[in-house]
Image (cartoon, rainbow, N blue to C red):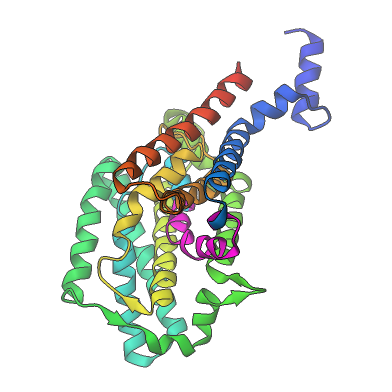
Amino acid sequence: MTEAVKNAESSTAFGRRWTARTFGARWASQIGITFAFVLMWVAFISLAPTTFLDSPIYVSFAQTTPYFALPALLLTMVIVSGDIDLSFVSIYGLAMVGFVAVEKTNGNVGLAVLAAVLIGALAGLVNGVIVTGLGIPALVVTIGTQYLYRGLTLALVSGKSYALVEAQDSAAYQLLDGRFLGIPMQFVWLVLVAVGTWLLLYRHRLGHNGHVIGDNRPAAELMGIPISRTRIWLFVFVGMASALASVMQSLQVSNFYPQIGNAYLLPALAAVFVGGTSVFGGRGTVWGTFIGAFMIGGIQAAIVAMGVEAYWIQVIYGGIILLAVSIHAVLLSRFER
């Protein structure tokens, strides 16, 4: 390697000189998903202007997308580390059992939210301990705990749903389902969690360790990275995010039903992978997952607004996902050559 090349690399590394290629190589995945998002939204506006140029649709997106985007953000970190969690959709219901038990006992909604988040963390802890302690692949473990947690939910409440109308008078309700400067609090919490996840993934040792573990686990062992502890913490965070999303949705509809969360498995996974996170681990982007969630959330609304026959929904859904993945994959390969 010549001295000039060394100096060029050093200059780029310390941020003193950027070129189109170095910028593209650094941000290819984010550029790709952003371009795909803009392209898709232009198509939606062109094909259904009445719907997508009207503010109510965006209020609806801001309220409903966080219900699967919140766990998707933390799931990004789990997948970056080389694991996966399919049980988060069942943690929704299990966490709400704790919420209902506390809220119906003493009427303290804030304490009930705390109970739900703690149960979510405990469920994530169980996942992490089994995966790391017994060495069983996370895919297998979380398929099992998905059924376990859903079964426990149904058994603990005897399959019954519970009205949560009285919770609407609490301060905790306003923090989770109110408005801030006219913006739904669900979206505010999503942004806060996204920022926190970004800081963890890119500016904290936990995220650095997760990247190394997902990219090269033997190297992580040689470096002395606490592999088991890191993986366990990431599962715990997914459980907590799932619990928070569950509480938000239940308060929004003023009702808890044991099957809550069942419909969010594929949308959350799609948001993560459409956003550019590698299924093989070692690479992921919080911005991509954030944008990907709104892409997934917008598809269903667009299909309905355009009056497309129901049997075309899955075709369009799959086609848009493949298009988004292809665009950012092409950009990634283009800049990394």
Q: Position of residue 104 (x, y in %)?
A: 32, 88
**Quarter containing the C terminus:** top right
Residue at left offset 25%, top offset 41%: 136
99 or 260: nearer the viewer: 260
Question: In the depicted view, which residue is nearer to us: 139 or 30?
Answer: 30
Picture residue at 75% right of the left edge, 21% below the top: 9
Q: Main secondary structure of the magenta part?
A: helix
* Residue at image coords 57%, 44%: 46
Q: Is residue 33 above or below residue 267?
A: above
- Write down the region rendered in magenta: 51-73
Where in the figure is residue 248, as x and y percent of width and height? 44, 71
- The quadrant in which residue 53 appears is bottom right
**Residue 220 visible to an observer of this rendering:** no
The stretch drawn in magenta includes residue 283: no
The verdict on residue 54 being magenta is: yes
User: From this viewpoint, is residue 277 visible?
Assistant: yes
Measured along the vertical axis of the image, is residue 235 above or below residue 252?
above
Q: In the picture, residue 147 is in which quadrant? A: bottom left
Rendered position, 305 above or below 23: below
Q: Name the residue furthest bottom.
A: 106
Nearest the camera: 203 or 318? 318
